[in-house]
Image (cartoon, grey):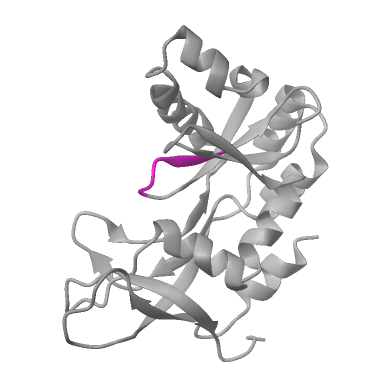
Amino acid sequence: MYDKLQQLLAHRNPRFVCRVAGARKGGPDKHIAHIDHVITPPVDADTLAGMRSQLGELPELFAFYERYGSLRLYRDSVDSPGIGCASAFYIAPPEAWAELRSDVGDWFSQLDEDEAAEFLPDWVSDCVAIGEVPNSGNYFLMPMVGEERGKVFEFEHDGFEFIERGASFEDFVEKLADVNEELLRDIGGHTRYDDGVTDYQWMPSAYLHDGKSG
């Protein structure tokens, strides 16, 4: 389980070859963004037991948190002013879910009754917010009811879209860990990397590493 994620985390010297987002006015035509991934210790047994009691049977979700407490993927090594080190995806620890759910609710509260009926799916009042796309206003939601239970959707605040990102939690995570052209385009659509020298914003166009550690 989570084979692609384990392979990704084992890569030595991971990096993106980046191109400038927007028009380039002289200077370098590409940038190598050195990246890493941040994981925290697994969730303790008492918390996992509480999650099982509250959420019911979601074995792939619990298997993840038995191994990782949280996960931040494709983090830049350069600290950008006002942002810090940009990263592409964040899967939050369970204790952060409530705050993320509150943040998502702030977006929903902007809708009037008719708009809510048009844009919000039936399960939106019974879901958990398990993560986010940092600095984007987009969140990852897992419905707890109905046919969509256990799937993962990205709430895209621009247009109030709910985009299925995984048929299960494992499917969701494994897609984030599989660096292909589609994922690079996805990352480039919301995450910008910094060269620490120019004011250019850099978008990944290729992924490189030096093999696997161990």
Q: Residue 137 in magenta? A: yes
State the extent of the magenta-drawn residues as a range: 135-140
Quadrant position of residue 158 = top left
Q: Position of residue 81 (x, y in %)?
A: 18, 60
* Left or right side of 74 for 59: right
Farthest top residue?
113
Camera-side residue of 19 and 76: 19
Q: Say which of 214 and 164 sits in front.
A: 164
Whether residue 112 appears in magenta in the rendering, the answer is: no
Seen in the image, is 76 located left or right of residue 37?
Answer: left
Give the position of the N terminus as an image quadrant: bottom right
Percent coordinates x, y for residue 190 in the rendering: 41, 56
Across and down, in percent, residue 85 comes to 32, 63
Measuring from the top left, give residue 103's x and y in whole percent.
Answer: 41, 29
- Residue 44 to residue 120: above or below: below
The quadrant of the rendering that contains the C terminus is bottom right
Residue occupying the point 47% across, 72% down = 36
In front of the other: 198 or 37: 198
